[in-house]
Image (cartoon, grey):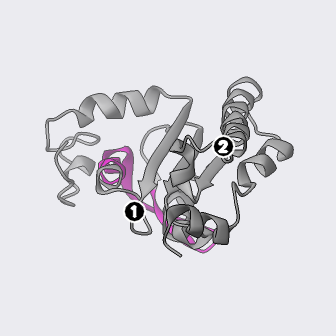
């Protein structure tokens, strides 16, 4: 997938078509046919990976050269119907919610119906017996959130709370990593 050049030819020559002829043509069709679009990325340095950012940039052909304002925020108007619901998922190996500030801001424009941000992400792959029960409870909450969203169209407050439950304290995690 080539990078967006910011030429905006996709708005005019012909509208909705990028100058790049690559796999993004297929991905745009898949995006437009989706009922729910899930954006997922590890967070290494405060934001989504370059690959996901490139995908988001390449969604420009779905916009039009018409400025719209909503609540003091400006954006380009949608040229075509996009998925009705978006989900944002990110995982970071560091402790602290501050690691997700930028990616949360980036995805706020698509008004996600569900956001799952997991810090202390190294725990998700551990086989440490003392940690696995908390990880399994968390992963079950993730599965439950997906089930609720797919079957009911929304995620319960109880499930959202379970998604935000810390797997361990920051002090324990720093010790777990051997970095304290």
Residue that badge 2 annotates: 135
Residue positioned 59% across, 54% down in the render: 118
Q: Position of residue 95 (x, y in %)?
A: 58, 67
Residue drawn 75% across and 37% down?
154
Nearer to the camera, 85 or 10: 85
The single residue placed furthest to the right in the displayed view is 158
Q: Inspect the magenta stretch and tell me whether residue 14 lies in it.
A: no
Extent of the magenta region: 55-76
Query: In the picture shown, does residue 93 fall above or below 141?
Result: below
> As displayed, is residue 51 above or below residue 80?
below
Q: Is residue 171 left or right of residue 54?
A: right
Mark 2 or 1, closer to the camera: 2
Front residue of 74/66: it is 74
Image spot of residue 138 (x, y percent): 70, 42
Residue 120: where, in percent of width, then height?
57, 59
Residue behind mark 1:
44
Secondary structure beneath label 1 = loop
Look at the image and tell me in which quarter the N terminus lies.
top left
Left or right of residue 119, residue 14 in this image:
left
């Amino acid at each position: 997938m080539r990078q967006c050049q910011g030429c905006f030819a996709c708005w005019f020559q012909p509208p909705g078509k990028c100058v790049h002829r690559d796999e993004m043509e297929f991905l745009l069709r898949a995006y437009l046919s989706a009922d729910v679009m899930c954006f997922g990325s590890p967070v290494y340095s405060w934001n989504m990976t370059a690959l996901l950012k490139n995908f988001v940039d390449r969604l420009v052909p779905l916009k039009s050269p018409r400025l719209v304002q909503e609540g003091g925020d400006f954006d380009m108007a949608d040229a075509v119907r996009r998925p009705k619901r978006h989900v944002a998922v990110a995982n970071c190996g560091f402790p602290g919610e501050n690691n997700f500030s930028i990616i949360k801001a980036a995805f706020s424009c698509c008004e996600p119906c569900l956001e799952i941000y997991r810090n202390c992400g190294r725990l998700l792959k551990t086989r440490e017996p003392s940690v696995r029960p908390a990880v399994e409870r968390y992963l079950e909450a993730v599965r439950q959130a997906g089930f609720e969203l797919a079957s009911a169209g929304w995620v319960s407050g109880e499930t959202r709370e379970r998604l935000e439950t810390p797997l361990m304290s920051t002090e324990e995690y720093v010790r777990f990593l051997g970095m304290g």
